[in-house]
Structure formats: structure tokens, C-alpha cells
Image: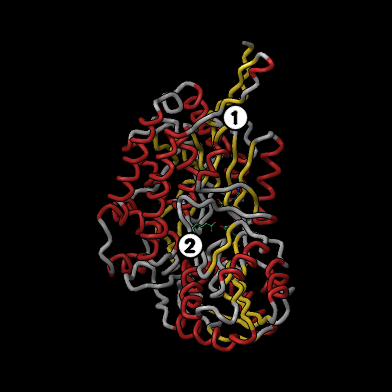
């Protein structure tokens, strides 16, 4: 391990579990075993606050995906998991949530070291919220119901029967590695599916700890499998694998399109949770302090690496200056530093490539807009980008239309309700949006007209295990979380019996 990372770890009292995990390279998890499989080599895992290598991960091969899918298939076709009493599955999932809570600090440390996340928010938003989702979905295990349909007048008795869809393939991103894995895992497990997950090669570590916890909780072998490796190899072979029954993906719109085509070639059912460029529409009567806090939580939290971040701010002209001021005051106080620092509000970007991409957008903003905050970038080996606010005029500009995935907020003025709805909906994306006003009637009216999967009123990015999440248009389709997700991991059979 590089001296700078050793010194970084020594500055904070990390758990012994984290130290020992970093000493041993994570392996693939297939059929209940940690194996090297057919891995062709390793990939360095880079710690973003120092820019130095912290671990290595195995580069799995296509044959590892085949082995993992075969294990998941056996576990589904012959194993106890889909066949056990639903309340037995429920108990195991609650035990797994207990274990996540027991090891929450360790999981948060690993997630922070892998992604650069600020440890405090990471503990809450990444780890504990994932355990909460597991408990929420565990409760559904005993509540999967079909229905009877009365066609007795024709001399028949009919009912529907819900059954687990089968083997679920999941491809997860690097911005919320464990959390998005749980977004896929919890519902699938509750109803009795089995699963193969391919994690992002940038952030593979928390899934490995989670795999150990699934063993400890008593999830049978083959039910949950993890194959690390490159997207273009492991990810592509999982997406197009004829042995999976459902593919669920979170990531970029471009990759989502490719995996979607691959899945459709096999008639594999599909959930795509893709990019966003979510608008915040702020009317003159809005609570601007709440708005500033909303931008902190949504745009700058997680260094802007959040698909539903409210990164397009439309401020009514009457509160334009006041809105900008309150945001600059609030966000300017954020502590941008290394993620393990307990006082960290915002850590570095996940990778040098992501930092460079964000800097290119900021450079564009310097030329084509007016920088109101940030933009100057810290030196040093870590992948830091300061919180940035840029005034723009042209709604068609790439800074206003493209997903930057960094701590960069663009602000534009508007005058009328119709105008802001037009501006907000003028995007290829449709993941989320928010309305900020003291008038309930206006809030509801505007929320009805915003074309997005989630609309928040006087808040942004308030997520809950019970609320479905997923977009429209180039933000994808299908839902994670909420009871709405269950249908995506179930198949419905219509049964009719002659009386
Ligand atoms: N909606 C969201 O939450 C996310 C959006 N993004 C957006 O995407 C941009 C680029 O990030 P990037 O890491 O490239 O995101 P990707 O969409 O490429 O990565 C998401 C997942 O897909 C995998 N993957 C990559 N290529 C393929 C493929 N051909 N077939 C199957 N799976 C594949 C990745 O693996 P691997 O990492 O190994 O390549 C990762 O596990 C970001 O700047 C951001 O705008 C990114 C992440 C999450
Ligand atoms: C406060 C936002 C939490 C988002 C958690 C998961 C994000 C998923 C995504 O970006 O796709």
C-alpha cells in the first residue's frame, strides 16, 4: 500500500475489520465460495482522497459469468431459497439487515475509501438506508398475492399466481455501490429470486463484504453471486446472458442503451435506472433557506455524483439574487476534504477520469456562463473539485442539458409558471424534479406537469424504501424500491380450471 494511503488510514481510527479486509484481495463470490475463477489479472482500486492504490480486484472473465449464472440457476431450480416458507426468507433477510447494522462502520469505511465519500453521510445514506430497504422488502416476502377472477358464469374458475421471475442479473454503478446493489437485491431476494451481480470495476469492495454477510445470515449457496471485472467483458456477458430471466441496471444512459439491447435479444425483462438532469423550479414565495439546504443534500452531497441531483436551478427573477446569495453562503461553508475525516461534508470525486470530465464542463462554464461560486480547483493528488455554481442563459447549452455528475449547479432565471415548466421539461431526461413554493395549489399544479419519475415539493432527493424510484425518457424505465418494484421480480401466471 502506498505511504500516502497508510498515512491517511493512520490519521483516522479505522476498524480492525477494515484494516484486515484491505490486506486481502477480494475474490469473486460464486456458488457460496470466494474464488479466483478464470480471472485474467487484477485491476488497481484507487483511493480518491490520496489518488493512490489501496487494493486490487480480480478481473473476472466471461466464463466466470457463466459459472455464476449456472450457480444461480441451480439455486433457483433446485435449491431451498425459492421453496422455503416466505417467513423463513423474511427472517434471514432481517438477520442480514442486523449484520449490516452491526458492521455499518466497517462498510461505511470501505465505501468511503473506495469512492471518496464523506463518512458521516455515507453511513446514513449508503449503509443504514440499505439495511432499512432490506427490512422493508423482507416484510413483503409474506405478502405476495395473486387474485381470483370470477368467470364462473362460463363454467370456469380462474386465479392469478405470482412467482419469482428467476435468475436476476444486476449491473451496478460506482456512485452508490452498496446502496444500488441493495436496490436490486432486496426485492429480488424477498420474493425468492437468485442473483448474479457485476459491480463497477471502480468500486468493487463493499459488495465483497456484503457477500460474506449473506453467508453469515444463512442465504444458501448460489443464491447470491458477485463477479468483478470490466464492464465491456463481465458486464456485457451478463447483460446478454441467455441464462438470466431479468436484468436490472443502474448507470449511464449510453451503457443502459447497450445493455438494454443485449437483454432484449434474449427477451430478458429489464429495469433501467439511468442518468438525469433534474430541475429545481423556485417561485418567489419559496423558503430560500430550505432551498439552500436542498441543494446541499441533492447537488453537493456525494460530490454531485447522484443521478437525481437537482442540477438545473430555475430561480424566479424576483428571487434570483437572493436565491444565489443564500446558496453561496450555505454551500461556501461546506467542508471539502478527505472522506474519512468525521467533519467532511464533501469528499473528492470517485476517479481522476470523473474529475477531469467535470473540470472540462467547468471550463465550458467559464467561457459561456458566469461563475458565481467555485470553479477554482484544489491542487494535490486527490480528485477534488470545489462546489461550483454557474449562471447560464441558454437552456440548450450542454452545461444545462448534459449530466455532469459532479458538484456543479447551473442557475437560470424565469418569469412565468408556463415558462419554467417548459424549461424544466426541455430535456432528454426525466428522472426527478422539484417545485419550491409556499402555495400548495401551485405546487400540485406544477408537479402534475413536470415529466419526471419523482417530483419533490419544497425538498429534493428525499428517498424512502417505501417510495418507488425510476425515471422516464432517457432516464430509463421500471422502478427500484416501493411495492411497485415487486412486480418487476415476479411473473404472473393466469390459471383457469374447468368447473
Ligand atoms: N444513473 C447513475 O446513477 C449513474 C450515472 N452515471 C453516468 O455515467 C457517466 C460515466 O460513468 P461510467 O462509469 O462510465 O458509467 P457506466 O454506465 O458505464 O457504468 C455503470 C455500470 O455498467 C458497467 N458497464 C460499463 N460498460 C458496460 C457494458 N458494455 N456492458 C455492460 N455493463 C457495462 C460498469 O462497469 P465498469 O465500471 O466495470 O465499467 C458499471 O458496473 C457518469 O459521468 C455519469 O454521468 C454513472 C454511474 C451511475
Ligand atoms: C440522496 C440521494 C441518494 C441516492 C441513492 C441512490 C442513487 C442512485 C443513483 O444515483 O442512481
Query: Residue 120, image x and y in percent?
Result: 35, 65
The residues bearing labels 1 and 2 have C-alpha atoms spaced at a distance of 32 Å
Q: Secondary structure at mark 2?
A: loop
Disc 1 element: strand
Q: Residues within 10 Å of mark 2 (few under 14, many from 20)?
A: few
Q: Is residue 226 above or below residue 42?
A: above
Q: Quadrant of the N terminus?
A: bottom left
Residue 462 tag number: 2
Circles 1 and 2: CB atoms closer than 8 Å: no
**In this view of the protein, which residue sits in the foreground, 147 or 419?**
147
Q: Is residue 374 above or below residue 473?
A: below
| Mark 1 residue's CB less than 8 Å from ligand 2 | no
Residue at (34, 45) in percent of width and height: 97
Name the spot of residue 405 as percent of width and height, x first.
Answer: 57, 66
Q: Is mark 2 within 8 Å of ligand 2?
A: yes
State the image coordinates of residue 417 (x, y, percent, origin top left): 68, 75
Seen at 31% across and 50% down, the residue is 101
Query: Which image quadrant for residue 19?
Result: bottom left
Q: Is residue 110 left or right of residue 305?
A: left
- Specify the label residue 492 is tagged with: 1
Q: Earlier in the sequence, mark 1 or mark 2?
A: 2
* Colour scheme of the rendered structure: secondary structure
Which sits in the foreground, 282 or 254? 282
Seen at 67% across and 67% down, the residue is 402
Decide which of 172, 189 is in the foreground and name it. 189
Counting from the top left corner in percent of width and height, residue 173 is at: 53, 54
Asked whether residue 37 appears in the rendered view, the answer is: yes
Amino acid at each position: 500500500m502506498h505511504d500516502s494511503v497508510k498515512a491517511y488510514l493512520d490519521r483516522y481510527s479505522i476498524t480492525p475489520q477494515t484494516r484486515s479486509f484491505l490486506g486481502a484481495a477480494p475474490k469473486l463470490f460464486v456458488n457460496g465460495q470466494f474464488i479466483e475463477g478464470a480471472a485474467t489479472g487484477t485491476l488497481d482500486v484507487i483511493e480518491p482522497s490520496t489518488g493512490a492504490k489501496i487494493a486490487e480486484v480480480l478481473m473476472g472473465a466471461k466464463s466466470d459469468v457463466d459459472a455464476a449464472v449456472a450457480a444461480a440457476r441451480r439455486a433457483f431450480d433446485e435449491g431451498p431459497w425459492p421453496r422455503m416458507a416466505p417467513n423463513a426468507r423474511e427472517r434471514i433477510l432481517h438477520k442480514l439487515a442486523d449484520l449490516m447494522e452491526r458492521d455499518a462502520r466497517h462498510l461505511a469505511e470501505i465505501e468511503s475509501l473506495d469512492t471518496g465519500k464523506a463518512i458521516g453521510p455515507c453511513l446514513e445514506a449508503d449503509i443504514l438506508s440499505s439495511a432499512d430497504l432490506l427490512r422493508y422488502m423482507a416484510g413483503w416476502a409474506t405478502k405476495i398475492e395473486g387474485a381470483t377472477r370470477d368467470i364462473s358464469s362460463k363454467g370456469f374458475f380462474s386465479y392469478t399466481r405470482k412467482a419469482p421471475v428467476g435468475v436476476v442479473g444486476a449491473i451496478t454503478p460506482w456512485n452508490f455501490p452498496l446502496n444500488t446493489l441493495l436496490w436490486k437485491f432486496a426485492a429480488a431476494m424477498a420474493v425468492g429470486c437468485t442473483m448474479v451481480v457485476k459491480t463497477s470495476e471502480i468500486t468493487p469492495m463493499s459488495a465483497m463484504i456484503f457477500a460474506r454477510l449473506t453467508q453469515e445470515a444463512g442465504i444458501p449457496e448460489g443464491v447470491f453471486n458477485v463477479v468483478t471485472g470490466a464492464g465491456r467483458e463481465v458486464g456485457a456477458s451478463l447483460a446478454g446472458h441467455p441464462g438470466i430471466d431479468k436484468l436490472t441496471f443502474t448507470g449511464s444512459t449510453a451503457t443502459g442503451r447497450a445493455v438494454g439491447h443485449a437483454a432484449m435479444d434474449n427477451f430478458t425483462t429489464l429495469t433501467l435506472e439511468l442518468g438525469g438532469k433534474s430541475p429545481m423550479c423556485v417561485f418567489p414565495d419559496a423558503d430560500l433557506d430550505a432551498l439552500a439546504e436542498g441543494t446541499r443534500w441533492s447537488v453537493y452531497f456525494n460530490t454531485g455524483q447522484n443521478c437525481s441531483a437537482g442540477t438545473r436551478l430555475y430561480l424566479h427573477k424576483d428571487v434570483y439574487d437572493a436565491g444565489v446569495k443564500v446558496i453561496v453562503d450555505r454551500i461556501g461553508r461546506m467542508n471539502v476534504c478527505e472522506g474519512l475525516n468525521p467533519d467532511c461534508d464533501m469528499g473528492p470525486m470517485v476517479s481522476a477520469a470523473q474529475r477531469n470530465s467535470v473540470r472540462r464542463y467547468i471550463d465550458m462554464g467559464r467561457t459561456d456562463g458566469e461563475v458565481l461560486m467555485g470553479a477554482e480547483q484544489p491542487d494535490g493528488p486527490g480528485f477534488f473539485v470545489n462546489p461550483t455554481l454557474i449562471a447560464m442563459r441558454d437552456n440548450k447549452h450542454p452545461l444545462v442539458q448534459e449530466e455532469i455528475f459532479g458538484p456543479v449547479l447551473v442557475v437560470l432565471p424565469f418569469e412565468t409558471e408556463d415558462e419554467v415548466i417548459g424549461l424544466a421539461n426541455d430535456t432528454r431526461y426525466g428522472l426527478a424534479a422539484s417545485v419550491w413554493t409556499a402555495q400548495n395549489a401551485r405546487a400540485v399544479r406544477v408537479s402534475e406537469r413536470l415529466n419526471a419519475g419523482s417530483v419533490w415539493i419544497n425538498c429534493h432527493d428525499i428517498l424512502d424504501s417505501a417510495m418507488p424510484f425510476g425515471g422516464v425518457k432517457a432516464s430509463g424505465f421500471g422502478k427500484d424500491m416501493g411495492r411497485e418494484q415487486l412486480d418487476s421480480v415476479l411473473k404472473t401466471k393466469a390459471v383457469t380450471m374447468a368447473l
